[in-house]
Amino acid sequence: MTRSDTLRRAVSLTLAVLCLLVVPQLAFARFADSRAPVMTVGAAKLVKPSAVTGTYTCRIGFLTEGVDVNVTGFADPRQPAGVSFVSTLYRGNTQRAVATETTKRVSLTTGLQLIDVGATSYRLTIVTKLGGWTAEEYSKTINCGTWLPGSGAL
């Protein structure tokens, strides 16, 4: 091995050792500010619809009856973005119509079914929904009289 090879190896070894000692010192950092970070977390709350406005019309056919419901709006203060409203119309415990809307307007109709003896009760429910979360349901009972069509406000 020549003198230049030995010198070259010595310089290379010295540079490698210096890199191992100096480079980590250049990359060393620390945080000088001791203030605690500020973070706020909020939670969205789904609320039950209230002050529902709209109309209903009871319909009578030949031995048939039904109801049409038109919701024109309701109050739902401070709802988070992206909510939908599931409106359902029941006759007794049987679901007769359902609609999911992102607006506060919906029209539901039961269609005509066989008439029953006496007055018929229908139930309108509206539930606010966001993903898999739901709010408490709004419920309104609508009574349709015997043999006479009727209408009214919700």
Image (cartoon, rainbow, N blue to C red):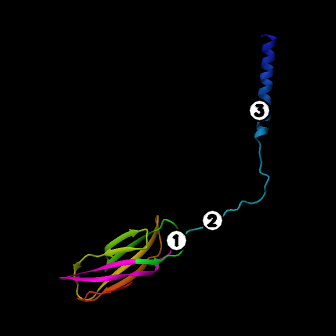
Q: Identify the residue shown where x is 32% and y is 73%.
A: 97
The amino acid sitting under disc 1 is Gln
Q: Sequence order check: which comes first, mark 1 or mark 3? A: 3
Residue 54 colored in magenta in the image = yes
Q: Mark 3 or mark 2: which is in front?
A: 2
Residue 34, visible in the rendered structure? yes
Q: Quadrant of residue 88?
A: bottom left
Q: Identify the residue shown where x is 51% and y is 66%.
A: 81
Q: Which mark is residue 79?
A: 1
- State whether the magenta stretch is mostly helix, strand or loop: strand
Q: Which mark is residue 20?
A: 3
Residue 93, visible in the rendered structure? no
Crowd class of label 1 (few under 14; some 14 to 19; many from 20; radius 10 Å): some
Q: Identify the residue shown where x is 45% and y is 69%.
A: 129
Q: SS for tag 2?
A: loop
Q: Is residue 23 left or right of residue 110?
A: right
Residue stretch in magenta: 45-71
Q: Is residue 44 left or right of residue 17?
A: left
Q: Sequence order check: which comes first, mark 1 or mark 2? A: 2
Alpha carbons under labels 1 and 2: distance apart: 17 Å
Q: Position of residue 63 (x, y in %)?
A: 18, 83
Residue sitting at the far left: 62
Q: Which mark is residue 41?
A: 2
Residue sitting at the far top: 2
Q: Is residue 21 left or right of residue 124?
A: right
Q: Position of residue 100 (x, y in %)?
A: 39, 68
The amino acid sitting under disc 3 is Leu
